[in-house]
Image (cartoon, helix red, strand yellow):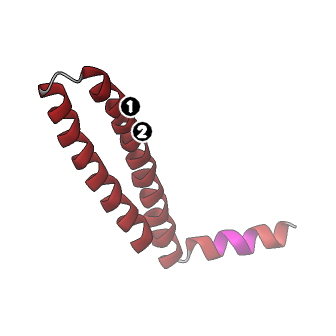
């Protein structure tokens, strides 16, 4: 889970940096460069969304495992096989 948190932090830093650079290029009239960076920003936001979903999934897995639910499911599936 720590690795996912670190990836989220890196992505957030990237998003902050891209936002600042896009503003600078837009103010300077370099619209084409700003548009290219906007695509990078969109990709970073998509990646951030995926990371948050992955973190949510692993949080749910850890919670279920702590309650012993995953162990019960594995045992049930083993008996069915």
**Relative to 75, residue 4 above or below:** above
Q: Residue furthest left?
A: 27
Residue 31: x %, y % from top left:
25, 21
Residue at 39% across, 62% down: 7
Q: Answer with the quarter of the image where residue 4 lies.
A: bottom left
Residue 48: x %, y % from top left:
38, 48
Q: Answer with the quarter of the image where residue 71 lies.
A: bottom right
Q: Which quarter of the rendered picture does the N terminus lie within?
A: bottom left
Label 1, on which residue? 39
**Relative to 14, residue 18 above or below:** above
Q: Which residue lies furthest to the right in this view?
A: 81
Front residue of 40/78: it is: 40
Label 2, on which residue? 43
Front residue of 4/25: it is: 25
Q: Does the magenta stretch include residue 60?
A: no
Front residue of 59/2: it is: 2
Residue 81: x %, y % from top left:
87, 67
| Residue 1 appears in the picture as rendered | no
72 on left or right of 80 = left
Task: Give the secondary structure at mark 2.
Answer: helix
77 on left or right of 24 = right
**Circles 1 and 2: CB atoms closer than 8 Å:** yes
Task: Give the secondary structure at mark 1.
Answer: helix
Magenta range is 72-76
């Amino acid at each position: 889970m720590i690795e996912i948190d670190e990836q989220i932090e890196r992505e957030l830093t990237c998003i902050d940096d891209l936002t600042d650079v896009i503003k600078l290029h837009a103010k300077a009239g370099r619209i084409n460069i700003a548009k290219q960076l906007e695509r990078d920003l969109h990709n970073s936001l998509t990646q951030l969304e995926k990371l948050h979903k992955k973190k949510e999934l692993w949080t749910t897995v850890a919670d279920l495992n702590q309650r012993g639910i995953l162990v019960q499911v594995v045992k049930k599936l083993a008996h069915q096989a």
